[in-house]
Image (spheres, rainbow, N blue to C red):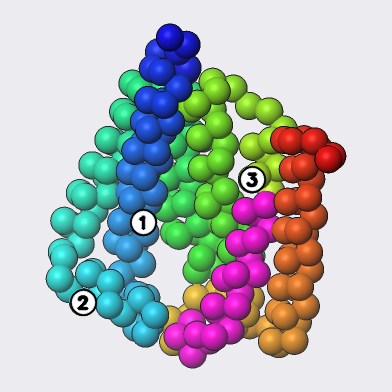
C-alpha cells in the first residue's frame, strides 16, 4: 500500500489533516473570543457568543483554546509531519496575536493583512498531505486572500453601527461607502483572476 506524508495511507493523512486543521481553527476562534470578549459584548452580531453572554468564564475559554491548539499541533505533527504542525501553530499565533490583538484595533488594513491567517489552511493542508509546496496552494492562498476583504467589508457596511459602537478600526466604518464599494469590486475581480490562474497550474488550459 502506498504511504503518504507521516507514514499513513493517503486517506488517513487527509483525515488527520482535517482533524488537525479543525482543532487549529477551533483553537484560534476560541482564543479570538477570549481576546475580543469586550467588543463582542457591545455588538449585536456577536452579542450571543458564550463569553459575551457570560455563559463561559474567560479563564475556561482561554484554557479551552490553548488545549485545542496543543492537540492540533500534536495531531498534525504525529500523524502528518512537523512542518505542517509548525505551520498550524504559526497560523494560530498570527490570527490571535497579529490580527486580533494588534491589527484589529489599530488599523483599517487589519482585514487585508490579518485576513491572511484565513488563507493558511490551503498551505498547511498541502504540506501535510504532500510533504512539500508547489505553485497550486499559493494560488489557492491568493483566491482566499483576495476574497476575504470584500466579503468582510460588506458585513462591516451592513453592521456599521455595531462596529462604530465597539470602535474597531475598520475601513468600512472610516471611509465613504462608495469608496469601500469600489474596493469590494476591485478585490472581487482579483479573486476571479486568481481563481482563473488555477486552470493552467492545477489542471490544464482545456
Q: Residue furthest bottom?
A: 161
Residue 129 place in picture, x, y as percent: 50, 26
Which element carries disc 2, helix, strand or loop? Answer: loop
Which residue range is magenta in the image?
A: 143-164
Magenta stretch encompasses residue 110: no
Kindly identify which residue carries mark 3: 141
Residue lying furthest right in this view?
Answer: 205
Earlier sequence position, callout 2 versus callout 3? 2
Q: Nearer the viewer, residue 9 or 153?
A: 9
**Residue sticking out furthest to the front:** 206
Comparing 106 with 166, the one in front is: 166
Query: Which quadrant holds the N terminus?
Result: top left
Kindly tell me whether residue 98 is visible in this rendering: no
Q: Is residue 49 left or right of residue 198?
A: left
Image location of residue 152, percent across then percent down: 57, 70
Q: How many other residues sit within 10 Å of disc 1, few (<14), some (14-19) or many (≥20)?
A: some
**Nearer to me, 123 or 169:** 123
Mark 3 crowdedness (10 Å alpha carbons): few <14, some 14-19, many ≥20: many
Q: CA distance from mark 2 to mark 1?
A: 16 Å
Mark 2 lies on residue: 53
Residue 29: which numbered mark, if any? 1
Counting residues from the N terminus, which is met first, the one under dot 2 or under dot 1? 1
Amino acid at each position: 500500500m502506498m504511504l503518504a506524508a507521516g507514514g499513513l495511507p493517503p486517506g488517513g493523512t487527509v483525515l488527520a489533516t482535517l482533524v488537525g486543521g479543525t482543532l487549529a481553527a477551533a483553537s484560534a476562534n476560541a482564543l479570538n473570543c477570549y481576546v475580543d470578549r469586550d467588543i463582542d459584548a457591545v455588538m449585536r452580531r456577536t452579542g450571543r457568543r458564550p463569553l459575551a453572554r457570560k455563559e463561559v468564564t474567560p479563564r475556561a475559554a482561554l484554557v479551552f483554546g490553548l488545549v485545542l491548539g496543543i492537540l492540533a499541533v500534536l495531531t498534525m505533527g504525529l500523524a502528518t509531519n512537523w512542518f505542517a504542525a509548525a505551520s498550524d501553530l504559526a497560523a494560530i499565533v498570527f490570527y490571535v496575536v497579529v490580527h486580533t490583538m494588534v491589527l484589529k484595533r489599530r488599523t483599517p488594513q487589519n482585514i487585508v493583512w490579518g485576513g491572511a491567517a484565513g488563507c493558511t489552511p490551503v498551505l498547511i493542508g498541502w504540506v501535510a498531505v504532500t510533504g512539500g509546496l508547489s505553485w497550486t496552494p499559493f494560488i489557492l492562498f491568493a483566491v482566499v486572500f483576495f476574497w476575504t476583504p470584500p466579503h468582510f467589508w460588506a458585513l462591516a457596511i451592513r453592521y456599521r453601527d455595531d462596529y462604530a459602537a465597539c470602535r474597531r478600526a475598520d475601513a468600512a466604518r472610516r471611509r465613504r461607502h462608495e469608496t469601500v464599494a469600489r474596493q469590494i469590486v476591485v478585490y472581487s475581480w482579483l479573486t476571479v483572476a486568481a481563481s482563473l490562474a488555477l486552470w493552467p497550474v492545477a489542471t490544464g488550459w482545456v
